[in-house]
């Protein structure tokens, strides 16, 4: 079966930027940056940068008075990030590579940030050790991760419905990290000091119910081969079924203008390398 062009790597990265970034990752990036508080002259690394929303915001803030680098394993995401940064005149050093083997020398950065990436790493402790290695001493790290589905009821119900229709195990990888205690323990085990991990409630703002469902399903498509094999009619039917079953849980969050605004609970961790 020929793969739908809307599920190609480049299309998925563009959907991520068009739908998930404004709804989730831009407002969350602003909160993360407030916690990170980048300073004039800082050398900053954004790990698992996606389309680069955190790196682009920090580069805009620092201008020529700092250096921003960004790392991701996905070449399509990096290609989209590079194009977007050029359109914004943001100067960023882009690197393709793994968070488990960060391709920078020891003590290359003053600040490392990672927004919603750690939960996807196959060896989370190794990734945090790598972040510690590339930090100057003293240096700072700021990490955000979703808490588990029990703390995020909208996505918990969505996951249950989608899994039932697709007939496969849980697709809850973005919410598979756990709770604040796990992040605290990981940071400590990686050698960080002065660790502060907070539970925050951040906004999710989608233009409509349909766009929430489409964006969330397409966001899963990158890691679900079975979904990528659906033709357009099958995908449309899936989205219709999910929408029908999500009506009740989404109803309290639909505003008068039909936008959908609901809370997402995350852990935000800050620590220092010394």
Image (cartoon, rainbow, N blue to C red):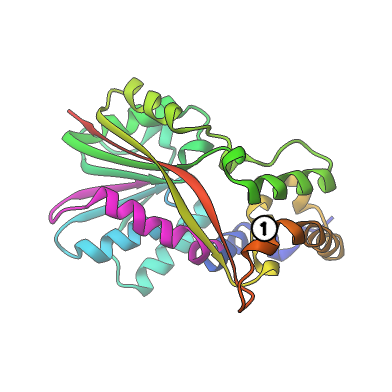
Is residue 103 shown above or below 64? Answer: above
Who's the residue at 53% across and 38% down the image?
120
Who's the residue at 39% across and 25% down the image?
186
Residue 4, given in percent of the width and then of the height, sits at: 75, 62
At label 1, counting other C-alpha atoms closer than 10 Å, the crowd grade (few under 14, some 14-19, many 20 or more) is many
Residue 63, given in percent of the width and then of the height, sits at: 20, 65
Whether 246 is among the magenta residues is no
Is residue 101 shown above or below 13? Answer: above
Which region of the structure is painted magenta? 20-47
In this image, 240 relative to 221: left or right?
right
> Where is the C terminus found, in terms of image quarters?
top left
Whether 28 is among the magenta residues is yes
Who's the residue at 49% across and 62% down the image?
21
The residue furthest bottom is 257
Return the residue at label 1.
218
Residue 253 is drawn in which quadrant?
Answer: bottom right
> Where is the N terminus found, in terms of image quarters?
bottom right
Exactly how many numbered labels are in the figure?
1
In this image, 214 relative to 234: left or right?
left
Residue 41, given in percent of the width and then of the height, sits at: 13, 54
């Amino acid at each position: 079966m020929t793969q739908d062009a809307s599920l190609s790597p480049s299309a998925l990265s563009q959907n991520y930027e068009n739908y998930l970034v404004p709804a989730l990752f831009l407002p969350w990036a602003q909160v993360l940056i407030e916690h990170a508080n980048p300073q004039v002259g800082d050398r900053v690394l954004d790990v698992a940068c996606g389309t680069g929303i955190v790196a682009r915001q920090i580069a805009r803030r620092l201008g020529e008075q700092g250096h921003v680098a960004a790392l991701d394993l996905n070449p399509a995401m990096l290609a989209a990030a590079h194009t977007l940064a050029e359109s914004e005149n943001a100067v960023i050093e882009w690197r393709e590579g793994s968070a488990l083997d960060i391709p920078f020398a020891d003590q290359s950065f003053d600040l490392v940030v990672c927004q919603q990436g750690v939960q996807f790493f196959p060896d989370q402790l190794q990734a945090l050790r790598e972040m510690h290695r590339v930090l100057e001493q003293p240096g700072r790290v700021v990490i955000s991760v979703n808490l588990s589905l029990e703390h995020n009821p909208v996505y918990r119900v969505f996951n249950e419905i989608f899994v039932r229709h697709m007939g496969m195990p849980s697709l809850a990888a973005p919410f598979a990290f756990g709770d604040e205690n796990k992040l605290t323990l990981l940071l400590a085990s990686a050698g960080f000091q002065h660790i502060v991990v907070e539970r925050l409630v951040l906004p999710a703002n989608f233009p409509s119910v349909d766009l929430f469902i489409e964006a969330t399903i397409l966001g899963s498509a990158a890691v679900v081969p079975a979904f990528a094999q659906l033709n357009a009619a099958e995908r449309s039917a899936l989205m219709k079924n999910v929408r029908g079953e999500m009506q009740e849980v989404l109803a309290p969050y639909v505003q008068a203008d039909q936008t959908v605004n609901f809370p997402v609970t995350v852990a935000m961790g800050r620590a220092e390398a010394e």
